[in-house]
Image (spheres, grey):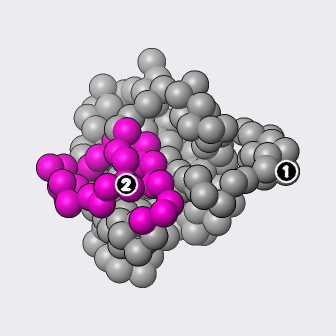
Amino acid sequence: SLIHLNSSVSKYGILRDLICVLIAKIFCLKVVTHYHGNPLLFKKNNIVTLFILKFLCNISDFNIFLDFKHISLFDKLIKRKSTILSNFIDDRSFYKLSFNRKFNNSNLTALYVGAVTKQKGIFELIKIAKCHPDIQFRVIGEVMGDLVGYKNFPNNFIMHGSLQRPRVLKYMYC
């Protein structure tokens, strides 16, 4: 049997993920750990969490990172095989958006897709939205940790929550 663990690489989530992998190992299960957060934050800020992350990487049978920058941090630290698997948005989607559209300055929209957390800069995005009321800010993603129950959003800041891929692409093209 094989377990595919999606790790948010958050401060407390990494400990939860480690416990899950340890339990899987008790039952002799193979574990592929897919890291969706930013492990580079731990390199600078928290030695204990970095140690837990390194341990998680080493006891997982296989590790998947989002890009070369993240995998390169662990290449020297871990003994297990690793690979890169980018996010689900195809780069060709960005090409279509960037070069095949004409923008009307009076209807600008800023789109954020990802986990809605302090670590990902959501409070900075809220400040930017407050300074630019003429731009509509759309945020798509699961609200996590310190933002659950937060309600002090400006009128031009729309929270959509988690959406399926077709709806995310719809907002990217609109």
Point 18% across, 49% down: residue? 148
Point 22% across, 55% down: residue? 147
Point 18% across, 55% down: residue? 150
Disc 2 versus disc 1: distance between alpha carbons? Answer: 26 Å
Location of residue 110 in the rendering, given as x and y in whole percent from the top left corner: 54, 56
Asked if residue 9 shows in the view, the reply is: no
Label 2: few (<14), some or many (≥20) within 10 Å?
A: many
Three-letter amino acid code at the position of disc 1: Phe
State which quarter of the image contains the N terminus.
top left
The reply to whether the magenta stretch includes residue 142 is: yes
Q: In screen coordinates, is 172 left or right of 115?
A: right
In the figure, 65 relative to 39: above or below?
Answer: above
Name the secondary structure under disc 2: strand
Q: Which residue is mark 2?
A: 157
Range of magenta residues: 133-160
| Among the two numbered marks 2 and 1 on one chain, the one whose residue lies closer to the N terminus | 1
Q: Which residue is mark 1?
A: 99
Along the line of sight, which residue is nearer the eye, 88 or 68?
88
Label 1: few (<14), some or many (≥20) within 10 Å?
A: few
Point 45% across, 55% down: residue? 137
Location of residue 132 in the rendering, given as x and y in whole percent from the top left corner: 45, 70
The reply to whether the magenta stretch includes residue 47 is: no
Three-letter amino acid code at the position of disc 2: Phe
